[in-house]
Image (cartoon, rainbow, N blue to C red):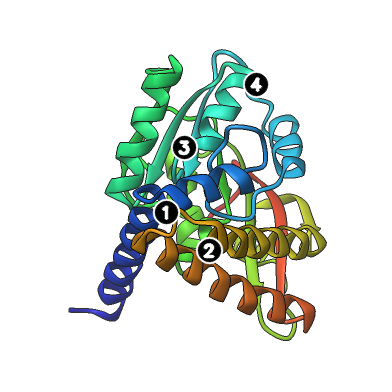
Amino acid sequence: MRPTQLTGNAVRLYFELSYRLLMDSPEGRRFLRLVGPTPGSQVHGYTTASDLDALIPHLGPGIKDRLLDLGSGAGGIALEVNRRTGAQVTGIDLSARAVVVATARAEASGLHPGVAFVRGSIRRPPLVGATGAFALDSLMFVPLDADVLRGIDAALDGQGRLFATALAVGSSASDPIRVAADELGLTTIVSEDVTDDLRRTSRHRRRVAAYLARRGPRTIRGQVAMTVITAEELVVGSLAHAGRLRRWRTVVRFGGPTD
C-alpha cells in the first residue's frame, strides 16, 4: 500500500471516529450546537459568522447556482448557505456517518433536494455542474497542493470561484491555498489572515468542552469526545499563541492557466 493510501485511510478513520463520538453522544451533539457560527448550525471546526458573511458576497450565489461544499461535515454550512441564497448545494465528505447525519438534517429541514450530500474526496469532487465551491477548514485534511486545486478546477468546469479557510503550521505559516494557486497561475482575489478569529474560536471550543465534561450527562462516548476536543484546542491555542499556526481566508478565481 502506498503512503498516500495509508494517509487517506488514516484520515478516513479519524473522521469516522470523530463524527461518531460527537454525533452519537448527547454531549457531542450539544457541543456542536453551542460552538456553531449561527443558531442551530452544527459545525465541527473553526467557521465563524464572519466567514459566512464573507463567503456569500465573494461567491455571489443566486437561486439558479449550484455550489460545492468541500468537506461538508454535519451539513450546517451547506444548509445555512441554502437558506440565505436559495442556491443548490452539494456537500462532499469522507465520513459516511457525516453524510448520513447531514442528509437526515436536510430532509428534516425541508431543504432536500435543494441540499444533497455524498461521500467522496475533496481532491476529486463530483461533476455536478457547480458554479462555485467553498471549503471551510477542510483542505487541511488533505495534502494541500496544486493537484487539489486542479480537481476543484475540473469540477467547476474551469470557471467559478473557491472560497476557503485553511490552517497553516510553521514558522512562516504562509497562506497554503495562495501558494498552490500561484503555482497554477490562478488569480487569488483575497488572502486574509484571520488568526485572531481562530484564537477566539479555539478558546470558546475548549471552554464549552470543559463545561460539558463537568455537567454531563457524562456518557462514555461524550466524555471521550470532550477529552479529545480539549486536547486538540490546547495544542491549537499553544501553536497560535507562539505564532506557529495561522488561519487564512482565501478566494481563488478559476479560468486562468493551470499548466
Residue count near mark 4 (Cα–Cα under 10 Å), binned few <14, some 14–19, many ≥20: few
Q: Secondary structure at mark 3?
A: loop
The answer to whether 199 is drawn above or below residue 170 in the figure is above
Question: Could you tell which of marks 3 and 4 lies nearer the N-terminus?
Answer: 3
Task: Name the amino acid, label 1.
Answer: Leu
Question: Could you tell which of marks 1 and 4 lies nearer the N-terminus?
Answer: 1
Pointer 4 residue: 84
Residue count near mark 1 (Cα–Cα under 10 Å), binned few <14, some 14–19, many ≥20: many
Q: Residue at x 72, y 54 (%)?
A: 249
- Please tell me in which quadrant of the rendered image residue 166 appears: bottom right
Cβ–Cβ under 8 Å for marks 1 and 4: no
Q: Which mark is residue 22?
A: 1
Question: Could you tell which of marks 4 and 2 lies nearer the N-terminus?
Answer: 4
- Left or right of 108? Residue 42 is right
Q: Which mark is residue 75?
A: 3
Gap in angstroms between the C-alphas marked 3 and 1: 14 Å
Gap in angstroms between the C-alphas marked 3 and 4: 14 Å
Pointer 2 residue: 213
Q: Secondary structure at mark 2?
A: helix
Cβ–Cβ under 8 Å for marks 3 and 1: no
Q: Nearer the viewer, residue 151 or 246?
A: 246
The answer to whether 201 is drawn above or below residue 113 in the figure is below
Q: Secondary structure at mark 1?
A: helix
Q: Secondary structure at mark 4?
A: helix
- Left or right of 170? Residue 94 is left
Question: Could you tell which of marks 2 and 1 lies nearer the N-terminus?
Answer: 1
